[in-house]
Image (cartoon, rainbow, N blue to C red):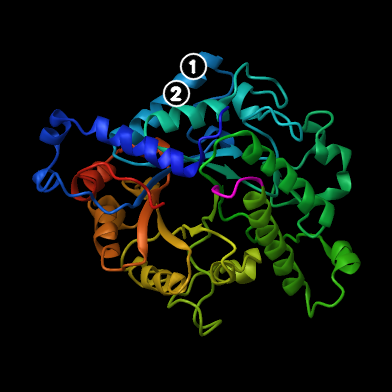
Amino acid sequence: MGRMGRRGFMAAAAGVLAGLTTAGDAAALPAAGRKGRGHVPRPEFRGMWVATVTNRDWPSKPGLTAAKQRAELLGHLDTAAARRLNAVVLQVRPTADAFWPSPHEPWSEYLTGAQGQDPGWDPLGCAVSEAHLRGLELHAWFNPYRVAVHTDPSRLVAGHPARVHPDWVLPYGGKLYYNPGIPAVRAFVQDAMVDAVRRYDLDAVHFDDYFYPYPVAGQVFDDDATYARYGAGFPNKAAWRRDNIDRLISEMAARIKEVKSDVRFGISPFGVWRNAVTDPLGSDTSAGVQTYDNLHADTRKWVKQGWIDYVVPQIYWNIGFAAADYAKLLPWWHDVVGGTDVDLFIGEALYKAGDPAQPAPWQDPAELSRHLTLARSYANVQGHCFFSAKEVMTDPIGAMARVVADHYPTKVLPPG
């Protein structure tokens, strides 16, 4: 595939957007979107996640034909364009596997139903080219350390790196993970991910919130032996674990830029770094999970050090939620990126809209729109990303349609 580069993509996307905003399109827009058509709207990030793990969003089930898989993918891209989004964050390495022909890891079982089986096409290559044709950025979403959503290594395809190196793997909470404390593991997972950067015209590399696993009551992530081998000089295991993740992020950032300097690197962490009662630098929250302490991910440090290009905190709570109020976390993250070159986009819990298990505010189709209205008050907020594609498409109570009507009257470019 020819190398377009981010600058070339931005120029091409501008042309696509101009072509799509026809007179008929303008007539269908709300009045606010038709006023002053000579004015170029401020760039902002309008993204959606497409989750492939356990076939959450796409493909709808394993074992579909290549043609059906492709058609479903294009349907999601078309939906993103129709909703006037400008970026798709596609999960391409959900469980130490690949949605492209990787020399390091097997084809994902979420494509064919059998790990290692060639699906007969190149999903990532197709996603990149078709996203760009629609004026969408393609951010490749990788999970560094999750190996499987079960604990049986024998279920992995023969030759899987986790079977070749059983000492790399730990079971925890019903899943298998690569051990982040082993330097060879850190190098390997970077190799596996950088391969996609080298091959494809990606706009960004994207990690979500999974580093060390979320705590599971009564279970231990048994890395004592690894700590004994590699943890000299650290005051405790927690500090050593954080250093392991710091190294992953800083090294990955450097390797991406070395391969392609215009490919961005973004992280979407759990929305609470630390509670203020734990650390005066933390947020006015009382969340049960803190990324610094529980996932050993010092996400605030990564912003302050400039290791990442953008951050998308998952502020997945409603305005007024006592333990983690959207209206309190938004200004906290706004202040964290202040004085840095790191872009701030907000992760939005579209999946909660209309879910009867969620608190009352999520039954109101206007809740998410209120989030975007509030975010306008904070200059450092440069956009939003919605979880996830299935709800962007089906929109059960019209929350996404309300966001589009209230906030996305015209198509815009992402920040560049």
Indicate which disc residue 347 carries: none
Q: As shown in the figure, which amino acid type bears the numbered disc 1?
A: Lys
Relative image position of residue 13 (x, y in whole percent):
36, 37
Relative image position of residue 335 (x, y in whole percent):
41, 74
Vertically, is 226 above or below 414? Answer: below
| Viewer-closest of 341 and 124 | 341
Vertically, is 335 above or below 14? Answer: below
Relative image position of residue 65 (x, y in whole percent):
55, 14
Is residue 261 inside the magenta stretch? yes
- Label 2 secondary element: helix
The residue sitting at 59% across, 23% down in the picture is 122
The residue sitting at 65% across, 59% down in the picture is 249
Q: Which residue is mark 2?
A: 72
Relative image position of residue 246 (x, y in whole percent):
68, 65
- Label 1 secondary element: helix
- Residue 398, quarter of the rendered image: top left
Give the magenta-colored segment's residue range.
259-263
- Residue 346, quarter of the rendered image: bottom left
Q: Decide if residue 167 is on the left or right side of residue 30.
A: right
Q: Is residue 393 visible?
A: no
| Viewer-closest of 382 and 108 | 382
Indicate which disc residue 68 carries: 1
Vertically, is 187 above or below 288? Answer: above
Q: What is the crowding at mark 2: few (fewer than 14 residues within 10 Å), some, or many (at least 20)?
A: some
Q: Decide if residue 312 is on the left or right side of residue 361.
A: right
The residue sitting at 40% across, 28% down in the picture is 133
Vertically, is 42 above or below 125? Answer: below
Q: Does the magenta stretch mainly form a helix, a strand or a loop?
A: loop
The residue sitting at 66% across, 46% down in the picture is 259
Cβ atoms under marks 2 and 1 closer than 8 Å? yes
